[in-house]
Image (cartoon, rainbow, N blue to C red):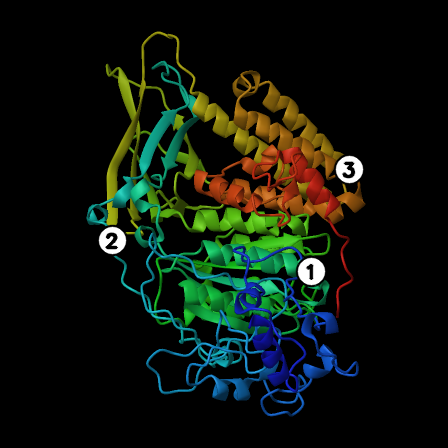
Amino acid sequence: MGSKWRKAKLALGLNLCLYVPKTLEESSSLSRRSNDAVSLSPVTVPRPTTPTPSSSGLRLPRSISISSSKKTCAICLTAMKAGQGHAIFTAECSHSFHFHCITTNVQHGNQICPVCRAKWNEVPLQIPNAKSKPIVRPRDDAWMTIPPRRSSQNQPSPRPERLRPVSMIFNNEPAVFNDDEALEPQDRPAESTKPGGVSGKLEVKTYPEISEVVRSVSFKDFSVLINLKAPPVSSSSSSSSSRAPVDLVTVLDVSGSMAGTKLALLKRAMGFVIQNLGPFDRLSVISFSSTARRSFPLRLMTETGKQEALQAVNSLVSNGGTNIAEGLMKGAKVLIERRFKNSVSSIVLLSDGQDTYTMTSPTGSNTKGADYKTLLPKEVNRIPVHAFGFGADHDASLMHSIAENSGGTFSFIESETVIQDAFAQCIGGLLSVMVQELRVKIECVHPMLKIGSVKAGSYRFDSRTGSIEVGDLYAEEERNFLVNLDVPVLDGVLDTMSLLKVGCVYRDPVTKETVDLSNSGEVKILRPVLEGRPVVSVEVDRQKIRLRAAEAISEARVLAERGDLTGAVSVLETCRGVLSETVSGRAGDALCVSLCAELKETQERMASRQVYESSGRAYVLAGLSSHSWQRATARGDMSDTTTMSYQTQSMVDMVNLSQTMTFGCPRASSNGNSSSNPNPSPSARRKLRQALTFPARPRAR
């Protein structure tokens, strides 16, 4: 009986197609998708094969082929060709139709292919309870696939799932970007309404350089360390519903030099970012080449939002030149003109080349346009731009300038294979913001004291008010500031001397309440009559060597830009010798060891003019960005210990998650079973990435 039914099916479908599935189960198995958002090899839909005479009992004409059948719509029997004004929909069974033809065919809920009668697992979707025609989601045989919908038991979606029309997602770009998706109310745990949120308050500690100074002696440039540490991510605030939601705009270079593997790995990295955003986070995608385009509006990353975002990223095509300025302006426009605002906002910029249109490099002679500050509106200065430059062709000086002026960080990606890891580290921080708008106020207690200087890096210190504008802190992120004072000779009988009062005010991004820590601490030292045995602060010593190393790298960079590479290497070598002789250096302190390794790596990247131009400058600027903001940045291939400075646990966890899925093909183990080796050693990862590093492509103009 089964054989007769099969012959009948084949006879009925003879004039329509060349393939009849053996069973609906076998047909549906062709459309099963991988749980991974993307893969490192192109995702292709399995092609049905023509049945042989022995399997079907019928002989088909040789002149008929699958390629010819795909040129004609099986519904209206007219030609299908891209670029003739008709959208084309390709089903999971590989049959293609005109967009308007298939919408008419399935408007009554038909879930079967009109050609091969295979049941579709992913049918052309319709908007529930709507009178409009159904919406068909086209397939794109590219580098990523839309993941299957997951169970939402642990993270319920805040709104009913519905896909928007493809034309609205990809094609419409209004004059004003006020079409951002409305924010949904979040269900907070009851304890999150307490001041300081669910994870406690900011920790403030102070350390004097030494514990005592004799009364009859003055001490010039006496250092006091102020240490700030953000609260950790507690178990109750680990879900996206109880942390600060993010508005993230990614500005991506899709110029001609991004063609091939670079663009494929960028899409994969974006797939990782999308999958790790929560339903209360919002994402927008700006792509730029010769011009800029909003490829995806600011949308909530619900399950449907993620699918739409992946479609938008998957549709990116590389061509043209590089107009970084227009891409940045359009990215800023999305955030400035949005109707609703999440607690955290940020722009991620990625480019692999020189701006060929309007930007002026801080070290170049480009006169095509103004610099970054004059190109962008003032509002964007309050939104950090985290810039990522990779390869040997990007303008590291320009990218560093963009990040520095906006309050963001600059990262150098030497190999495109670590784009995903670099993005993972960045969003690991952005998705764990625990302190916002932090402001530290320093006040001298003793009337004879006066603040000499404050080592605050790129953070602005207002000497008139005695305050440091710190801004946002990620979970468990630390900031260290050295305050220098001139301690005078003391008259009187007091055994102690009060130096400073430290106070902090910040906003809790979860509760949106202001937390006032006005009396965070008071710094005191002993003033004995006779010299005793003062205790030297190891914490102060560690921060002094950190600042000394950063200053040496900055000085070496100035010399290298002047062409004096020999002098630059000498400065770094001298600093390494000094650090090894400090208290921390002799004790084998982890920070000191890491700084010495960074100085040595910087020396190697200044070995010659060619090495410095190709990678040294970018490596140095990424390091300076990290030290000036005391925040982790990506450098090189992210496999050495120098990139671990300032990393938080949230960043480490996200990078580890990225590295377990960096390479999609499982590794065959000795027993024949596949193993993904989720925790390869740093040396193994480095060798694999070096093997997959591709030479820079010539840039299209």
* Disc 3 target residue: 607
Front in this rendered view, residue 145 or 411: 145
Q: Whole-percent x and y of residue 643?
A: 58, 38
Q: Is residue 310 above or below residue 452?
A: below
- Looking at this view, name the residue that lies furthest to the front: 1
Q: Nearer the viewer, mark 3 or mark 1?
A: 1
As drawn, the label of residue 188 is 2
Give percent across and percent down for residue 73.
62, 87
Q: How many marks?
A: 3
Q: Is residue 313 above or below residue 89?
A: above
- Mark positioned earlier in the residue sequence (2 or 1): 2
> Of helix, strand and loop, which one carries label 3?
loop
Q: Nearer the viewer, residue 58 or 633?
A: 58
Is 63 placed left or right of 316 in the picture?
A: right
Please give left or right for residue 52 compared with residue 310 in the image.
Answer: right
Specify whether 110 is left or right of 264. left
In front: mark 2 or mark 1?
2
Judging by the rendered image, the residue that carries numbered circle 1 is 353
Please provide percent x and percent y for residue 693. 73, 48
Q: What is the secondary structure assignment of the residue under circle 2?
A: loop
User: Which residue shows up at 66% across the image and 50% down it?
Assistant: 417
Residue in view at x 59 percent, y 83 percent: 97
Identify residue type, mark 2: Arg
Q: Amino acid at mark 3?
A: Ala
- C-alpha span from label 2 to label 3: 55 Å
Judging depth in this view, the residue of 138 and 12 nearest the camera is: 12
Query: What's under tag 1, amino acid-wise?
Result: Gly
Q: Nearer the viewer, residue 562 or 542?
A: 542
